[in-house]
Image (cartoon, coloured by chain):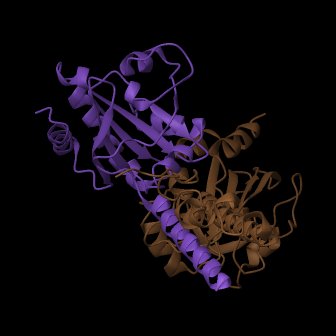
Chain colours: A brown, B purple
Amino acid sequence: MKSYPGGQALPTGLCGPPGGNVIEPSIVPLSHRPGGLSQGGLEMEKRRTISLILAVATLTLFVQVSSLYAISEAFKENIYKVGTLKPVDSVLKVKVGGRAPDFTLPSISEEKISLSQYRGKKNVVLSFVPAAWTPVCSDQWPGYNIVKDIFDQNDAVLLGITVDNIPTLFAWTNQMGKLWFPVLSDFWPHGAVAQKYGVLRSNGVAERALFVIDKKGILRYINVHDINKRPPLEGLVNALEKLKK
Amino acid sequence: MKRILIGFVLAVVFSLSIGLSAFAANKPPQKGETLPAMNLPIPKSPGEKSYLGLSGEGSFKIPQIKAKVVIIEIFSMYCPYCQKDAPGVNELYSLIENDPDLKKKIKLIGIGAGNSTFEVGVYKKNYTVPFPLFPDQDFTMHKACGEVRTPYFIVVKINEDGSHVIVHSQLGEYPGAKPFLDLVLKSADLK
């Protein structure tokens, strides 16, 4: 059986130009028709109708084919399909060079974590992701999980944050293997920390956002990324390496 | 009457397009098929170039690899199962390379779905992956392969005349180096 690359035009042999077998029989040369040229008006109308059918059919095919490009690689059987969302749906309340708002949140290990506990000791990366059990989020932290050495080299800790509750985060992150970094729940008051940073979307989930905070508590890098895409790792690594300079 | 006919034609075309689109999106490469068209960059590393039997610069297609069988792993740096299986896949490479007969016949490559060059480099370094890995940051190859979940394994047999055929494909469930090698040898009639 032949495979059909996603997003490519479908093979004409299978799908065919819409005019193919269905419409072509009605396109009979005028000279072969009874009445011939004397029915020119009628023929013109028929041709217009056929053109309309062709146009609509072609458009339909393009709409269907192009939608294939929107399908994420990360849709797994137990992942809820969210479709393509508005890339960013919030307004930042902090800026690079400003002080990072402090917070205290519960983690899945039952420990409470405060941003201020790292002041003067460690650089901090906050990784907000929108929600547990959704496509891109499920494929972001497992990547960070294998680069602890990069965080260590840059004297940084990572705090993963979502607005999900602790039991949900516990079950979800268990699927990722053992994470070396704390996972925090910004569930109640709902999304309060995300709101403080200006990354709470209008539907109550967080943006896909990265914040790098230095040991003095100053924001040094902010990336509120397109929620539909995973931020490439190199952007974060570059930001961490700049802290040394 | 004409309106009914038009409606019917449009309905048929619409249904057909939906059906074929879904088929195109969800169908990974299967046994007996050929690979979708994929161009990979010729590696810069002389070692990897030599391993694949390639020369020069630019791009190549997988059946151009100098081998009788190519094992392709579609992976992602962000995929926990790929991470878990990485040592076992490295062991597969060692089993092949340590066999003087098999090392001439079977080659192994990885395609990092949605991974940048940097991310593929991190994966390669972290797991000391000894075989060539190729980034697919914009998912081009991943889409061409039906947007499979990862890890996904494809075994391709390359014939004397340069034609090729997929002799095995599987989603995850990597059984370990030796059982997988046995499966490859059997699928490709190399046993």
Q: Which one is in front, B136 or B124?
A: B136
Total number of numbered labels? 0
Residue B62: where, in percent of width, then height?
41, 31
Would residue A207 be seen by someone viewing this image from the given angle?
no
Splitting the image into 4 quarters, where does residue A111 fall? Answer: bottom right
Q: Which quadrant of the figure contains the C terminus of chain A?
A: top right
* Residue at horizontal 37 percent and vertical 20 percent from the top: B51
Residue A82: where, in percent of width, then height?
61, 73
Does residue A88 appear left or right of residue A114 in this picture?
right
Q: Which one is in front, B188 or A85?
A: B188
Would residue A164 be seen by someone viewing this image from the given angle?
yes
In this rendering, the answer to whether A219 lies above or below A190 is above
In this rendering, the answer to whether B190 lies above or below B22 is above
Q: Which one is in front, B119 or A171?
A: B119
* Residue at horizontal 51 percent and vertical 69 percent from the top: B16
Splitting the image into 4 quarters, where does residue B64 fall? Answer: top left
Residue B134: where, in percent of width, then height?
50, 34
In this rendering, the answer to whether A207 lies above or below A244 is below
